[in-house]
Amino acid sequence: MATADTEVAVGHGPDMATVAMSLALESPHAAIAGGSGAGKSELLAFMVGQLMRRGYGVACLDAKFTSHMWLRRVPGVLYASESEELHEALVWLDAELLRRARFVSKGGNPATLVPIVAVLEEMNGASNRLRAYWREIKATGDPMMSPALTALGNLSSMGRELRMH
């Protein structure tokens, strides 16, 4: 069920009614598509700003380096652009997801968890960089697939209930 805490305004419809998306839905992901200069990053900043005002934590994975530079200056925001930073941020998000899952499985109330929104910019390029980075640092005995890419899959499929969007 959507609440004011989980609704994010994205604009106005033809009748000036607010158009919103809900983070409480089964698949609360937003893909913003448009040409260069269409306002994708501006829309995302508008959405993230609403969530930050409600106390959400933010993890910004900006493989393009320049999409959300304003977030670099915000205290408490996890901001990653370099390949190593992207890798470490995703691994941390996966560990946080697991910590939250264990907390809830032991009877903890998920409503007490600080919600986190992950902003993933240019993930096609980021995925390529993460694969290359893993090939560089992978040691004998490490998994074949980058743990960061595994984490990305986990976050996209298991985060909603644990207040990670």
Image (cartoon, grey):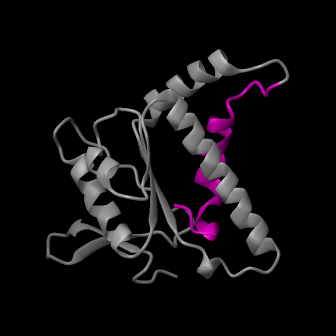
Above or below residue 72? Residue 133 is above
Q: Is residue 123 magenta?
A: no
The residue closer to the viewer here, 130 or 82, is 82
Q: Residue at x 44, y 75 (%)?
A: 6
Q: Is residue 152 magenta?
A: yes
- State the image coordinates of residue 111 (x, y, percent, origin top left): 60, 81
State which region is magenta.
142-165
Q: Left or right? Give the position of 102 relative to 56.
A: right
Above or below residue 82? Residue 24 is below
Q: Left or right? Give the position of 124 relative to 8.
A: right
The residue closer to the viewer here, 47 or 81, is 81
- State the image coordinates of residue 129 (x, y, percent, origin top left): 51, 24
Q: Residue at x 64, y 43 (%)?
A: 91
Q: Residue at x 19, y 70 (%)?
A: 12
Magenta stretch, main secondary structure class: helix
Q: Left or right? Give the position of 21 relative to 126.
A: left
